[in-house]
Amino acid sequence: MPNLEGCRIVKHDPAGHWDIREDIINWATLMPKLRTVVRTSYEAGYRMLFKRVAGDLRISEGEWRVEPAANARGSRLYYTALVAPNFAVPQFML
């Protein structure tokens, strides 16, 4: 993750099916650091789903998904995310 300054696991499932992580991101000069807390669920070898639990974002959710390629000679990685801040973002940054 670009500009990531810190990442810690706050809580986790001993079986490894999910965890809750806190990230600190220094995303822009002269702007406050961004704190995000997400719960990530793992479907081994197939998908990671994440969803906001707390932090400076109003919305933070999405997934990483791996599927076999059509020719069965590799894999295709998909990433989707929906992110919305709790604060106004300067127009030049959009």
Image (cartoon, rainbow, N blue to C red):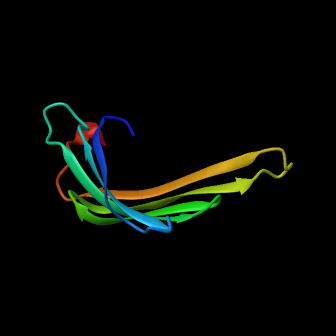
Question: Residue 26 or 86: which is nearer the viewer?
Answer: 26
Question: Residue 92 or 3: which is nearer the viewer?
Answer: 3
Question: Residue 62 or 11: which is nearer the viewer?
Answer: 11
The part of the image, by quadrant, that contains residue 9 is bottom left
- In the image, farthest residue toward the top: 29
The residue shown at (69%, 49%) is 76
Across and down, in percent, residue 91 comes to 23, 42
The residue shown at (50%, 68%) is 15
Answer left or right for 90 relative to 44.
left
Residue 76 drawn above or below residue 16? above
Across and down, in percent, residue 59 comes to 31, 63
Residue 4 drawn above or below residue 13? above
In the rendered image, the quadrant that contains the C terminus is top left
The residue shown at (20%, 59%) is 86
The residue shown at (24%, 64%) is 54
The part of the image, by quadrant, that contains residue 68 is bottom right
The part of the image, by quadrant, that contains residue 73 is top right
